[in-house]
Image: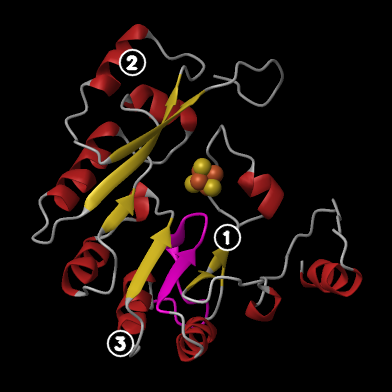
Amino acid sequence: MNQLLDAALRTGTPSIDLRMDDEPELPEAFHTLRENPWRAAVTISEGCSRQCAFCVVPQTRGRERNRDSGKIIREVEDLVARGNIEIVLLGQTVNSYRDPLRREFRFADLLNRLSEIRGLERIRFASPHPSDFTDALLEVMICRPQICNHIHLPLQSGSSRILSAMKRGYNRDQYLRTAGKIKAASRPIALSTDIIVGYPGETEADFGIRSRCSIRYNMTTFSRSNIRRGPTLRL
Ligand code: SF4
């Protein structure tokens, strides 16, 4: 990855390499093109170790790799020193973050630590996975006003049967429990979601279950599932 970025910076033209690397490197900050002087995106992890049936990320970006928290904190401190007041932490399942050197240091700890940086006014993150959404994460969002009070929590389907076919790793009740805690939090937190409509095998009954999910979202994005022939989806 870093060699590709080096080549692109050197030549000014896009670089493409379609080979799959078993241990791909994590992109480091000096490769990031940042044009907004106030708001900067900071990658904290790459790839995904989940296996959702509809997603190519694990095949194209490899398993999840996390950056050292020390490097992330130094990068954010440097961005703030250069005038950025808002950062967006990025990862495919950003809230599954664990420091590779200190496994007990998790996403909530990282948010907590970043909230202590003087001059950093807003922290956002994208996108969390429902199964990795912990009480500790909700607690730090309630206590730290610098963390923007919005969570995008992809539901994908309200039917446990379809969620299982999608290999999402949670069922309807587990999702509703997490969403309910967010909605009941002492600090108002906006909730948005993604939903896939017409997933292979979805019946009218599954559709009806989804529409009876009792969560009021502030924003919902719907995607229509593509009907594909081939080996990708076997239900
Ligand atoms: S958790 Fe997200 S990135 Fe990972 S496989 Fe599922 S949809 Fe893809």
Q: Quadrant of the C terminus?
A: top right
Image check: 12 left or right of 56?
right
Q: Quadrant of the N terminus?
A: bottom right
Which of the two discs, 3 and 2, sits closer to the camera?
3
Image check: 66 left or right of 193?
right
Q: Circle 1 is placed at which residue position?
A: 64
In the depicted view, which residue is nearer to us: 110 or 79?
Answer: 79
Residue 116 numbered tag: 3
Residue sticking out furthest to the top: 204
Please tell me which of labels 3 and 2 falls first in the chain. Answer: 3
Overall secondary structure of the magenta section: loop
CA–CA distance in space, label 3 to label 1: 27 Å
Residue 46: which quarter of the image? Answer: bottom right
Residue 5: which quarter of the image? Answer: bottom right
Q: Circle 2 is placed at which residue position?
A: 207
- Badge 3 crowding class, 10 Å Cα cut-off, few under 14, some 14 to 19, many 20 or more, is few
User: Mark 1 falls on what kind of element?
Assistant: loop
Q: Amino acid at mark 3?
A: Glu
Which of the two discs, 1 and 2, sits closer to the camera?
2
User: Mark 3 falls on what kind of element?
Assistant: loop
Please tell me which of labels 1 and 2 falls first in the chain. Answer: 1
Residue sticking out furthest to the right: 11
